[in-house]
Image (cartoon, coloured by chain):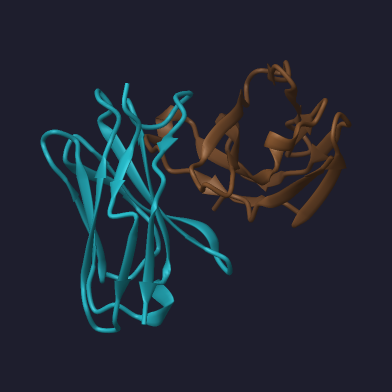
Chain colours: A brown, B cyan
Amino acid sequence: AQTVTQSQPEMSVQEAETVTLSCTYDTSESDYYLFWYKQPPSRQMILVIRQEAYKQQNATENRFSVNFQKAAKSFSLKISDSQLGDAAMYFCAYRSSPRGNTGKLIFGQGTTLQVKP
Amino acid sequence: KAGVTQTPRYLIKTRGQQVTLSCSPISGHRSVSWYQQTPGQGLQFLFEYFSETQRNKGNFPGRFSGRQFSNSRSEMNVSTLELGDSALYLCASSPGTGGWEPQHFGDGTRLSIL
């Protein structure tokens, strides 16, 4: 069974600085998808960024980028130029490939990010 | 386009009762998944429905059940409520199952068991 681990329960960053959130996963599959979701106190989960395992190029979405290391099974999220609105809980999630025929997401335990003004 | 709508937002029940939660997916989305979120266990997958069929089920007791209607709206039911069922229940929808398309989440239903 696949597992996702986020080893940092809490992180803090100064506004305008850069922070990296860690995520590791365990799987025997070669084709899969990885996601980072953000959950603000308002509680709606919002997609931040996604990565396909067969793509070596790291995904980037504006100030958000990932460092995907497939061999190491690592998927970290880098937030550049942190803003107060980035304060939230961040979840790393894994999904099997389409051949697995499921939309099921497996989540890590989450990292609470505090942004200091 | 309206997002995923979950009703009610808050619910208070007592042990032994049953509860039904509702989820209306984004228009055009045919897949609906349910997750339970608690401080201790984090986010855990409950089940997934696509075109009125349950495609996948998480490791929860039979007291947890769900269904999906022809308009893709979904309900989940929990019978014989226990204190440990207190949680935020999240519904997520996507156009199909699996793959690149991300799941879009609702605001959740906060269930408290007294």
Answer above or below: position of A103 versus A114.
above
Answer above or below: position of B29 versus B106.
above
Answer above or below: position of B100 versus A23.
above
As drawn, which residue projects farthest toward the left?
B70
Q: Position of residue A42 (x, y in %)?
A: 52, 47
Q: In which quarter of the image is residue B87?
A: bottom left
Q: In which quarter of the image is residue A69?
A: top right
Quadrant in which the C terminus of chain B is drawn = bottom left
As drawn, which residue projects farthest toward the front?
A117
Q: Residue at x 24, y 79 (%)?
A: B80
Describe residue A99's horizontal placement relative to residue A76 as left or right: left
Residue A114 visible in this rendered orientation of the protein: yes
Quadrant in which the N terminus of chain B is drawn = top left
Q: Position of residue B16 (x, y in %)?
A: 24, 83
Q: Residue at x 41, y 30 (%)?
A: A99
**Nearest the camera: B68 or A39?**
A39
Q: Position of residue B110 (x, y in %)?
A: 40, 61
Q: Position of residue A97 (x, y in %)?
A: 48, 31
Q: Residue at x 29, y 81 (%)?
A: B14
Residue A8 visible in this rendered orientation of the protein: no
Describe residue B7's horizontal placement relative to residue A110 as left or right: left
Q: How many labels does the image show?
A: 0
**Nearest the camera: A85 or A21?**
A85
Describe residue B23's horizontal placement relative to residue A90 as left or right: left
Q: Which residue is drawn at 34% across and 54% down?
A: B9
